[in-house]
């Protein structure tokens, strides 16, 4: 077979949010609204009928303006959101970096958090034992291992989160604009790491507002505008078209 | 038929994959509870012991005449009821409290509820130390029946898991659940013979408690084993298992039905 395995198949996906004006989250309001027949479901489609296929080893950039549904798309691929219509099938392990260190507990030490976050990503404790030193060295936090994470700076936290998620060589890496907090040196390091993973066969989905970064890292791109797909294809072409539109 | 079997297999695989997460969450809950306290885990033993002392002093003047060895009688009920009370109260906020994580990564959602119930179970098992101390001090009789207590605890655990799952999913949609449940558990604790003998109740209430209160099934079995050193009545065991399985089924069913909608409400 010439064609590489399809890692992510997004098939005519529509994602719906409940945009009720006031959130009804207690019984009293619920009953009042129910009696007044005001329990309307104001729907808001964050992503409308988008399809694309990502093959093994490809790097896709998702571009678009703020609130165009990029992050929602990534959340659906990671399994956090269920699509309203259409289907998403994913082959392989996904490391979602939607927010670095989402699973961190500020009261616990970095050492404990590395294990906790690793397990949140679906790894076993034994596996984390084996990779512990690698993670600590990449994040450069060895001197602070036993202090609680609440005393860490946001940059340190981001470094730790990134190294945990990428040290484990996932099949699919999902990166959502998280490197903005790191300093220049760390961004360079992350980019290098992502390139290493890419050459090792990892598939990358990348959201960034830095078009240069998308051009540098990705070979394909999809442009989503207000939930609707505008264009997909070679990264350079899509990025150029996007920039032309933005400059208008 | 094939499809349901497939789902079960998937569930099993996922549970196995995240087993270390469950263990870490349980140890985290226990660690955080006693972090920065001098006595640490000793509090799991000391705390029920102190409360029991207070309650014994208060209630022994009221009921001690018809109950022999009141401290052990009280402790058996207290231990089990407190476990149910604490674990389900903590379970209520287990989904809403972890919203940051659930919004950012995919984790099986029931793990958080299960972790709360399980860490409370560990806590209760530490508290068995206190029960042993009370039994030794009051020179209560020990027998091999005592060793059968895990069978009762297992029923109670399944019951609490079911109840916890139900409450935690309901709390996502209605945040009032926590307050309502507070009142429910207060009533429940008075309707369970913990610090009074069952016979102190009027006849019709006795019928209600012995037939409709699941906590009575567990407390009664546990007291038979530990306090009276006899085997529990088979009908009690049956009722206890039945209540546990029904609650578990209700919990799982309601949780599965609503878990995909959590993300829109947390």
Image (spheres, grey):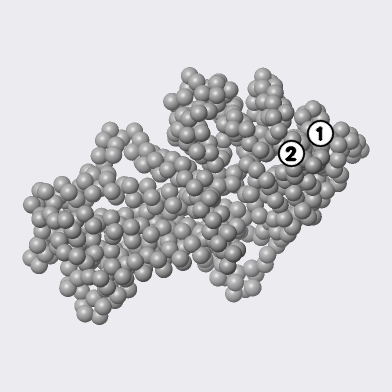
Q: Residue at 53% of width from left, 39% of height from top? A: A123
Q: Report the mark closest to the observer, 1 or 2.
A: 2
Q: Is residue B155 left or right of residue A147?
A: left
Q: Residue at 64% of width from left, 26% of height from top? A: A182
Percent position (x, y) of residue A185?
67, 19
Q: Is residue B150 visible?
A: yes
Q: Earlier in the sequence, mark 1 or mark 2?
A: 2
Q: Is residue B195 visible?
A: no
Give the class, few, some or many, for how many residues have Cα within 10 Å of label 2's Cα (few <14, many ≥20): many
Q: Is residue A164 left or right of residue B83?
A: right
Q: Please, which chain is the residue tagged with disc 2 on?
A: A
Position of B266 relative to B162 (above/below)? above
- Judging depth in this view, the residue of B233 and B45 nearest the camera is B233
Residue A87 occupies which quadrant of the picture? bottom right
Q: Secondary structure at mark 2?
A: loop
Give the class, few, some or many, for how many residues have Cα within 10 Å of label 1's Cα (few <14, many ≥20): some
Q: Is residue B166 left or right of residue B63?
A: right
Q: Is residue B118 left or right of residue A49?
A: left
Q: Are marks 1 and 2 in contact (CB under 8 Å)?
A: no
> On the image, numbered disc 1 is attached to which residue?
A219
| Residue B110: assigned label | none
Q: Residue at 13% of width from left, 59% of height from top? A: B70
Position of A238 relative to B237 (above/below)? above
Q: Residue placed farthest to the front in the image?
A: A1
Q: Residue at 37% of width from left, 54% of height from top? A: B87
- Judging depth in this view, the residue of A197 and A30 nearest the camera is A197
Same chain shared by disc 1 and disc 2: yes
- Judging depth in this view, the residue of B11 and B29 nearest the camera is B11
Percent position (x, y) of residue B181?
40, 62
Give me the C-alpha separation between circle 1 and circle 2. 12 Å
| Residue A56: assigned label | 2
Residue A100 occupies which quadrant of the picture? top right
């Amino acid at each position: 077979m010439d064609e590489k395995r399809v890692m992510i198949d997004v098939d005519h996906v529509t994602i719906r949010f409940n945009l009720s004006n006031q959130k009804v989250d207690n019984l009293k309001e619920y009953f009042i609204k129910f009696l007044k027949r005001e329990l309307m479901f104001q729907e808001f489609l964050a992503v409308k009928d988008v399809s694309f296929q990502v093959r093994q080893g490809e790097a896709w950039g998702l571009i678009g303006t703020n609130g165009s549904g990029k992050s929602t798309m990534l959340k659906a691929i990671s399994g956090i959101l269920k699509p309203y219509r259409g289907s998403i099938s994913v082959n392989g392990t996904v490391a979602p970096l939607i927010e670095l260190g989402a699973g961190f507990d500020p009261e616990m030490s970095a050492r404990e958090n590395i294990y906790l976050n690793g397990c949140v990503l679906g790894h076993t404790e034994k596996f984390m034992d084996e990779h512990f030193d690698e993670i600590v060295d990449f994040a450069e936090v060895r001197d602070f291992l036993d202090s609680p994470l609440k005393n860490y700076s946001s940059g340190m936290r981001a470094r730790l989160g990134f190294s945990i998620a990428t040290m484990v060589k996932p099949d699919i890496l999902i990166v959502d604009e998280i490197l903005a907090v790191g300093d220049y040196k760390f961004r360079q390091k992350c980019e290098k790491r992502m390139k290493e993973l890419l050459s090792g066969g990892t598939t990358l989905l990348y959201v960034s507002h830095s078009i240069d970064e998308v051009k540098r890292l990705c070979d394909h791109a999809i442009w989503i505008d207000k939930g609707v797909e505008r264009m997909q294809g070679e990264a350079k072409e899509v990025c150029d078209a996007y920039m032309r539109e933005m400059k208008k | 038929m094939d499809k349901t079997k497939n789902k079960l297999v998937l569930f099993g695989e996922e549970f196995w994959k995240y087993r270390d997460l469950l263990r870490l969450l349980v140890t985290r809950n226990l660690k955080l509870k006693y972090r920065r306290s001098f006595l640490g885990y000793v509090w799991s033993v000391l705390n029920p012991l102190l409360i029991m002392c207070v309650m014994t002093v208060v209630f022994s003047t009221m009921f001690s005449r018809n109950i022999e060895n009141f401290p052990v009688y009280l402790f058996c009920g207290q231990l089990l009821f407190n476990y149910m009370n604490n674990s389900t109260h903590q379970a209520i906020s287990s989904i809403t409290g972890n919203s940051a994580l659930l919004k950012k990564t995919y984790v099986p959602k029931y793990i958080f509820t299960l972790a709360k119930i399980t860490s409370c179970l560990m806590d209760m098992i530490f508290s068995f130390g206190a029960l042993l101390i009370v039994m030794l001090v009051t020179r209560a009789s020990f027998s091999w029946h005592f060793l059968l207590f895990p069978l009762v605890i297992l029923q109670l655990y399944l019951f609490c898991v079911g109840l916890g799952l139900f409450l935690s999913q309901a709390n996502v949609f209605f945040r009032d659940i926590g307050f309502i449940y507070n009142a429910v558990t207060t009533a429940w604790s008075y309707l369970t013979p913990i610090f009074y003998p069952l016979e102190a109740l009027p006849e019709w209430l006795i019928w209600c408690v012995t037939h409709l209160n699941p906590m009575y099934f567990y407390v009664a079995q546990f007291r038979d084993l530990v306090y009276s050193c006899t085997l529990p009545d088979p009908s009690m065991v049956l009722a206890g298992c039945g209540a546990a399985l029904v609650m578990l089924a209700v919990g799982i069913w309601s949780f599965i039905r609503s878990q995909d909608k959590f993300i829109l409400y947390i």
